Image (cartoon, rainbow, N blue to C red):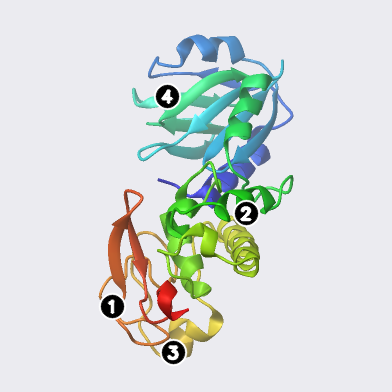
């Protein structure tokens, strides 16, 4: 499932291509056909992103709410657009560009109040400027749930996925099994600030890189990472490989229905903190 930086990147891509003019809207697959007909020809007024949710705004204060889920894909191209296939749930088209949406978990026409309700149920997003990490801290600091699980809970922090949660905990030497209530305020503030930096870089480069300059392949004389998830990382999908810093074997276990990765030496358990 795409992490929050990908959704914010897609929002910027839509804004650049469509905002300010009329857009042809269609649903070649047919599932969204009724709503597409209502929007066809209206002005595209803007975009918004919150966590893993993308919102496309149209004249009349209505929005298309998109959640890609595990299998959704959004692709862009210029015109003339190729004939759409039957897998295209939503196509946007103007005089210069087209965008095709395939396989999302959610593609729905919603009103402004319905959009507000979605924002209200989500936690703060490190990539948004309208909120800081305080609301998340209030939930984390009172919880007996592990900090690794809390970071993946979209009602606590929106947009953080499996890669960012593993990497940010490693970067700050925090045991992923530490209960949220045992995390210090200083540790939380450092995690939040680092997530903002890392995820902004993710938007800019369209991939996740979390390794500090001194631990990059060219600095350490090691081979670069080869992985379909993108850039250089410390622990994610590196189970049983040597930690870049201490050499210990990276561990993995299932937590919050996803595979967790951590270094037992660099992220000591609560009894060794």
Residue nearer the viewer, 143 or 130:
143
Q: Position of residue 134 (x, y in %)?
A: 68, 52
Q: Closer to us: mark 4 or mark 1? A: 1
Q: Which residue is drawn at 41% across and 76% down?
A: 271
Give above or below for 160 relative to 38. Answer: below
User: Which numbered disc, 1 or 3, marks the residue that appears first in the sequence?
Assistant: 3
Q: Closer to us: mark 2 or mark 3? A: 2
Gap in Å between the C-alphas at discs 2 and 1? 33 Å
Q: Where is residue 82 in the image (x, y as percent from the top left)?
A: 43, 30
For the residue carrying disc 3, how many other residues have a C-alpha within 10 Å: few (<14), some (14-19), or many (20+)? Answer: few
Q: Closer to us: mark 2 or mark 4? A: 2
Q: Position of residue 104 (x, y in %)?
A: 41, 31
Residues marked 4 and 1 touching at CB (< 8 Å): no
Q: Residue at x 60, y 43 (%)?
A: 13
Give above or below for 237 relative to 131. Answer: below
Please state if 137 lies on the left or on the right of 173 as rendered. right
Give above or below for 32 relative to 66. Answer: above
Gap in Å between the C-alphas at discs 4 and 1? 41 Å
Gap in Å between the C-alphas at discs 3 and 4? 46 Å
Q: Mark 2 points at which residue?
A: 137
Quarter-of-image position of residue 178:
bottom left
User: Which numbered disc, 4 or 1, marks the residue that appears first in the sequence?
Assistant: 4
Gap in Å between the C-alphas at discs 2 and 4? 38 Å
Q: Name the residue under label 1.
A: 241
For the residue carrying disc 2, how many other residues have a C-alpha within 10 Å: few (<14), some (14-19), or many (20+)? Answer: many
Q: Name the residue under label 4.
A: 89
């Amino acid at each position: 499932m795409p992490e929050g930086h990908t959704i914010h990147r897609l929002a910027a891509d839509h804004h650049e291509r469509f905002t300010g003019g009329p857009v042809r809207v269609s649903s070649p697959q047919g599932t969204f056909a009724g709503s597409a007909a209502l929007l066809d020809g209206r002005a595209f007024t803007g975009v918004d992103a919150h966590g893993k949710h993308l919102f496309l705004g149209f004249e009349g204060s209505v929005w298309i709410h998109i959640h890609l889920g595990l299998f959704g894909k959004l692709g862009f191209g210029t015109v003339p657009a190729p004939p759409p296939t039957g897998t295209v749930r939503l196509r946007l088209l103007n005089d210069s560009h087209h965008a095709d949406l395939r396989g999302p978990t959610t593609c729905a026409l919603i009103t402004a109040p319905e959009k507000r309700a979605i924002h209200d149920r989500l936690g703060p997003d490190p990539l948004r400027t309208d909120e800081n990490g305080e609301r998340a801290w209030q939930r984390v600091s009172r919880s007996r749930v592990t900090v690794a699980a809390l970071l993946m809970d979209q009602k606590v922090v929106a947009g953080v996925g499996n890669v960012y949660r593993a990497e940010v905990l490693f970067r700050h030497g925090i045991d992923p099994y530490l209960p949220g209530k045992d995390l210090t305020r200083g540790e939380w503030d450092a995690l939040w600030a680092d997530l903002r930096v890392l995820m902004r870089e993710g938007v800019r480069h369209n991939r996740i890189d979390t390794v500090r300059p001194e631990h990059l392949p060219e600095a350490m004389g090691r081979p670069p990472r080869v992985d379909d998830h993108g850039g250089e990382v410390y622990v994610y999908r590196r189970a049983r490989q040597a930690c870049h810093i201490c050499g210990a074997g990276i561990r993995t276990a299932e937590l919050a229905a996803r595979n967790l990765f951590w270094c037992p030496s660099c992220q000591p358990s609560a009894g060794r903190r």
